Each structure stands twice: as C-alpha cells, then as structure tokens.
Image (tube, grey):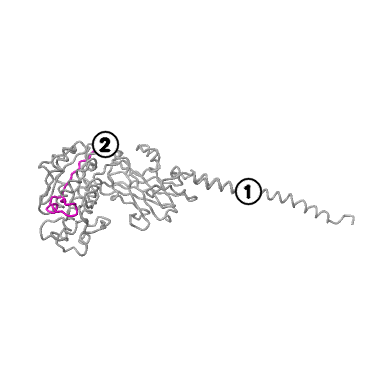
Amino acid sequence: MRTALVWLGFVLVCLAGCASPRFLAIPGTTTRVALPQMESGKEYNLHILHEIGECDELGISEEDLHLCLPFVDRSSGEIRLSYALYNSETLSSMPEHEELLSVEFQGTTVGNGSTGQEMTVIPHDPWTQSGTLYVLVIDGSGSMNERGGYGGLTRMQVVKQALKRQDVMDAFFGGDGQDNAVMLLQFTQGIPSPVGGAFVALKNRREYKAAVSKLHVLNGYTHLFDAVSYATGPLLERDEVKQALSNGLRKPNVIVLTDGFNNEKPSDICGDNVDRLERLLEHLQDVQLTDLGTRPQVHTVGLGKPIRPGFEVPYGNKPPRAVDLCGKRNIDTRIDGELEVRGIDNASLHYIARAGGGKAHIKRGRQGLAKAFLEAASPRYRWFEVRIRMDPFYLRRDFTVRLELMGVGSAASSIEVYPSAWLDAPPGRPLPDGWHVADTYKRTLLVVVPVIALFVMLSYFASAIYNTRRLLFGRVKVRSKSTNRPSSKE
C-alpha cells in the first residue's frame, strides 16, 4: 500500500512539471508543446506563441495571458493557439485575415461547416502607428440610379448615406496617432475617374464628406474587372498615389463596390466573364509579388441579392469555371436586362477578394452596406488568436497543428501538442460566446486530494482492522488450543 502511494505521488509530481526536456509545459494546464517549426521561403515569419516571455515582449496584459499561450480542452475538443507575424525580426501589423488563414490538424484542413469542426481568428491589440490609404472605387453605371427596396432612394444615394455615417468615417480616418487618407474614384466604361476631377488623397472628414457628396451616376456598362485591374496597377504608379505612400506609413487598401455584373457590351452572357476573370486573377497574383510595404489589399462589396447564395471559392488556385460563376442554368443567360436584374455576381467578387488578400462583402440596405465598409476598413493588429474545435476523440493523443497564411502575405508554421497521457485537464470555463479559457489545477486538486486522502485513510483503516482482529480473536484462539492440549504426564 505504501509503495502504491509513493508511485501515485511520483505520477502527480510529473504531471505538474516532470516533462521531457523536448517539451514545454504550459503553466496552469496539463498541455505540453514542442518548439514551433517555422517554414522557410515565406514573406513573413509566423511565430506561434508558446512561452510567457514572448507574450510579455508583445506587451500582452496579464489578464490576456491565458489567451496568448496554447490551450487544449479535451471535454469540448477546443484548441487555441496564438501567433504574431514578423518581417525578419520586426513585428508586422496585419489586418483581419480569417479567410486567408489555412489551419491543418494532422494534415487535414479544418473548416467551418465540416462535421464537428469550427474555426475562428480573433485579432488583438490594434496597431495605431501605421496608416492606410483607402482607395474607394464606386460603381457609377446606369443601374446605380435604380430605386426599389431602399425607401425611395436610388442605389447611389444609399451608398452615399452609408459612406457618410459617423462610424464609417471613424473607421477610415482612425483615431489619434493614425495617419490615414482616402482616395475616391468612380467607374463605368473604361478606366475609373477621380471624383471631382483630380486624384487627391483626402486627409480629413470635411474633405471626405464633400467628395462623397459629388458621387453621381455616370451611366454606361459595368467594367468591373477593368476597374479592379486599374486600381491595383496603373493607379498605384501615379505620382499622386506615390506621394501619399512615400512616407512608408500608408499601405493601400482598395475597396471596390458594385451592384451588378462585369458587363462590357449588350450581348454579354455570364459565361463570357470566365476568361476575363481569369486574366484579372492572374494580374492580382502578380500584384501579390510586389513589395509588402506597397502591396494593395483588395476588398469587394456587392450591393444587392447574390445570384449564387452560399457560394465559396474552391480550395486551391484552380482557374474559375463557368459553372462556378454562373451555375449550370445561367452560363448562357444574357447579363444586360436579365441576370443583373435578378442579382449580383457574388462569385466573381469572392474570387477577386481572395486573390487580392481581402474579403468579399455581399450586403443589402444601408445598415448592411455600412457594416461592409466598417469590416473592409479594419485596422491592423499586433497578434492573433486562432480557435478550432474538433471531435474530442482526436485529442486523446499528441497531434500537430499547422497554420498557413496566404494572400495578404505568405507565412507558415506548425507545432506539436502533447495533451497529458495520465490525467485530463479540468474542463475550461465557458465564456459568453460558448468558447472556453484555460483553468488551473485547483479544480483538479478538488478531485485528486480527496482520492489521496481516501488511499491514506484506507491504509490506516486496514491496519486498524487487522490489529483489532488480533486483539479480539487472536489471543482467544491461542488459549483455546493450549487448554485442549494433552498433558505431558498422561
């Protein structure tokens, strides 16, 4: 019994910290990790945070320290990792990029919608020391003059109202310490033109509101793809833009809004846009090879009803197909007067945003449109937290998680995680959103200490029973045997 107690104590001590030298124990949990492995040949170094010292260097507060370190909760199947991106040894701020982050669990990509899986990326600590040049490229085609569903307002009037909202202006111009600017363009046929006739970087809310008031419908067809190509290419070579970017603080963020399809002539059908889109995507891939400091991030905003609800860009860099853009029924359907009346080309907007390192926003109404601008004008952050949820069955042994960033910049890293083989960690404390935070050993001790006490009590109880039996019965039996023993004289 005493030997068993000694071994039990040894096991409990090892659970607390007798990890192999190749492992790092995560304080307050039973999780251990190996040193993360960064992949070479990438534009950024993706550091998976695994030590308190790394969190301290980023200035992470003590109350957020538990969010910085790796965490595994077997009861819910939750895994949490945090990371920061570095250009060489310099910390790089980064906008939200959930759609651009690929997460692999044991070599299998984790995705929302998969059975028992969930993934989200949470940004932390907005970076206020780097500014952004927002290039707004607004559709000015004839359809923007149409009414319906907007309280008697035209689509252009709805756009102007959304752009003038106080929260949208706050997002574009930021707070103290930020040096943001906005450049406003419109497009229809041909290349986009600057609102007001001159390419001006608007530096305050007063100039911005005056420029938004000048937005108007230009009529003509919707050369959407040409507008995106110009805003991410020739526009950035103009002296006015170079001057705005010359201080090295502003990074270009292109936001393109449309209410329809790419449409170049009356006879265009949906299938005609496949080759055009492929050429644009090749251009955007070339843009991603430019310098990180001046590389534009492209967001797309669609005002209206999506023609392909629930569409998601296929995984990988495969060229778009007609069935991807149009569905089987609309490949040969004319755009002018037919498809554009029924909705917007949300599939192309998703393709463009992913290739441009941004996000596609498909919205209807003023509130939704304002939300799209707010999300597209997301600030840059210092570090990020990725949470995934798997079937708890797969967390019974060691596993590897790999993170890969694509689009806004390339980076990849992996980490081996070793949940305790002896004792499950206590279940995490639930947050209001249903996810969990790490708990300490205190709750484990509530179970372990009584168990140890039970072993100790049983060891003493067993000895007490034995001695009592000896006292009550052992001597009586001895006397009985002596009285019945025959006398030696007989």
Element carrying mark 1: helix
Q: Are marks 2 and 1 in contact (CB under 8 Å)?
A: no
Between 25 and 196, the residue placed more toward the observer is 196
x, y percent for residue 436: 40, 48
x, y percent for residue 140: 13, 50
What type is the residue that disc 1 sits on? Ser
Q: Horizontally, is 425 left or right of 361 in the view?
A: right
Between 266 and 233, the residue placed more toward the observer is 266
x, y percent for residue 121: 32, 48
Q: Which mark is residue 129?
A: 2
Q: Horizontally, is 116 left or right of 4 in the view?
A: left
Q: Earlier in the sequence, mark 2 or mark 1?
A: 2
Q: Residue at x 42, y 45 (%)?
A: 438
How many neighbours does mark 2 have within 10 angstroms: few (below 14), some (14-19), or many (20 or more)? few
Residue interval drawn in magenta: 131-155
Q: Horizontally, is 267 left or right of 299 in the view?
A: left
Between 488 and 339, the residue placed more toward the observer is 339
Element carrying mark 2: loop
The quarter of the displayed image where residue 270 is located = bottom left
How many neighbours does mark 1 have within 10 angstroms: few (below 14), some (14-19), or many (20 or more)? some
The residue lying furthest to the front in this view is: 151
x, y percent for residue 125: 32, 40
What type is the residue that disc 2 sits on? Gln
Which residue is the site of mark 1?
459
Q: Which mark is residue 323?
A: none
